[in-house]
Amino acid sequence: MTTIEKMDKHANETQEIAKQAIDLWQHEVVFSWRWWLGVIITIFTWLFWIKYHNKESRYRLLLAGFFVTTVSISFDALGVQLGLWSYRYEVFPTIPAYLPYDLALMPVVIMSMIQYKPYYSPFKKSFIFGFLTAFVGEPLIVLTDIYKIEKWHFANSIPIYIFIYLIAHWLTTRKEFKEVT
């Protein structure tokens, strides 16, 4: 069997597994309480941000939020693909990441932290964010059976969360933006 034939066979197997996952999602996940929890988290998190964000800093904060979303989805999908963790009860069945976490909680929490007490040390904020997210946020989502850890530990997430926060903060302090008030 040639390399191309092997790759085609693998692609066909992957597509069949994806079809089975979508079928399972349609019959057992969508409209379950865990699915609704994800939808509600996503909607209310963004409604909170829309109501309480600093309007003068909107685009600067959204730049940070877009960065956080992009990195979160990328790292999350990579972790799923490498078998480090898995998700059940996804809001959308074809994306290997938990979108309420990556598209709502992560960016909105970071954007809110950046705008709250803007002169407080970003390093201290990043450590607070990293530890709380790893040791409170992740265990809570495990308790709901939405998130299953395979070959990972909560503590492994701390430096990643710190890095994401610090880069997001750095993006918001570029000279192109008006100072936070």
Image: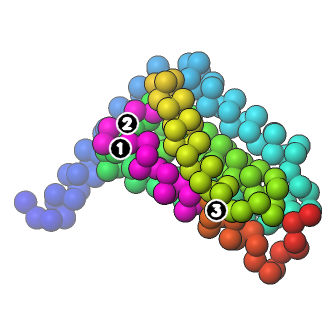
Task: Determine the residue located farthest toward the left in the rendered image.
Answer: 1
Across and down, in percent, residue 73 comes to 53, 53
User: What range is drawn magenta here?
Assistant: 147-164
Across and down, in percent, residue 1 comes to 7, 60
Precedes in sequence: disc 2 or disc 3? 3
Across and down, in percent, residue 156 comes to 41, 50
Task: Name which residue lies at 87% across and 66% down.
Answer: 180
SS for tag 2?
strand
Q: Which residue is mark 3?
A: 123
State the quadrant of the C terminus. Answer: bottom right
Alpha carbon distance from label 2 to label 3? 28 Å
Question: Can you see residue 92?
Answer: no
| Residue type, label 2 | Ile
Determine the main secondary structure of the stretch shown in magenta. helix
- Residue 149 is labelled as 2
Across and down, in percent, residue 101 comes to 59, 42
Name above or below for residue 68 compared with residue 35. Answer: below
Q: Is residue 16 left or right of residue 114?
A: left
User: Is residue 152 part of the magenta span, yes or no?
Assistant: yes
Alpha carbon distance from label 3 to label 1? 25 Å
User: Is residue 114 part of the magenta span, yes or no?
Assistant: no
Name the image quarter holding residue 23: top left
Q: How is the image coloured?
A: rainbow
